[in-house]
Amino acid sequence: MVVADDHALIRQASTEIISRIPNTTVVAEAEDGLDAITKARTFQPDLLVLDEAMPLAKGFEVLAEVRRWCPNTRIVMLTGLTSHNLLADYLDQDVDGLLLKSCSADEIRRCFEIVLAGHKYAAEEVRRILRENLGSRSLTAREGEVLSLVATGASNVEIADRLGISVKTVEKHRASLMAKLEVNSVAQLLAVALREGYLDAHKQL
């Protein structure tokens, strides 16, 4: 495993937790984002524990590069930030684990073990933050209909024809969906909608 964090205390704590997991060893530590990319490429670890905010390269940049060069490395993001937008964005990027620095040592160890076993894990506090934010994202019935048709790949003209509304109205509903789910593209819209239960993957996609 590689542990990347610009705070020595966090690296030390993570290493101590990892030492309690049988047959698991920290092979390298990194103090900044570029170093994290270099160490991951060099060691090709089973797991990279990655701080979200480090000098030289931030979490999303490191995530993209590690995915590019280390396709078999699983990644657990560790962040002290609790913005629901940031947490949702990392889940949209399909990270293997998402932890807050306020998590207990037991939960952090459980996350590492689950991810190393090939599964995904989001901290209980992360899930709570995302659940509490759902209330402000409730969709109207019409927005739900438009979303379902967007998921099928239908154009605005096709959606308007299916629902018996104007193309301009469809555009307004799509803009509202983007705003409520806080996304900037159709791909992000569908990813968030699936994750938060607005779409059924087996029926819609």
Image (cartoon, grey):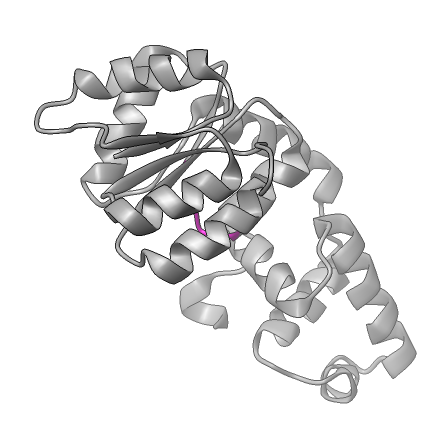
Q: Position of residue 122 (x, y in %)?
A: 42, 33
Q: Quadrant of the N terminus?
A: top left
Q: Residue at x 21, y 38 (%)?
A: 116
Q: Residue at x 61, y 69 (%)?
A: 148
Task: Choose top left, top right, bottom left or bottom right for residue 165.
Answer: bottom right
Front residue of 142 and 94: 94
Front residue of 181 and 76: 76
Left or right: residue 144 versus residue 172 is: left
Q: Position of residue 203 (x, y in %)?
A: 45, 69
For residue 181, above or below residue 1: below
For residue 192, above or below residue 33: below
Q: Main secondary structure of the magenta part?
A: loop
Q: Which residues are magenta?
A: 93-97
For residue 188, above or below residue 79: below
Left or right: residue 116 versus residue 158 is: left
Q: Can the viewer see residue 166? A: no
Q: Residue at x 78, y 67 (%)?
A: 174
Task: Choose top left, top right, bottom left or bottom right for residue 190.
Answer: bottom right
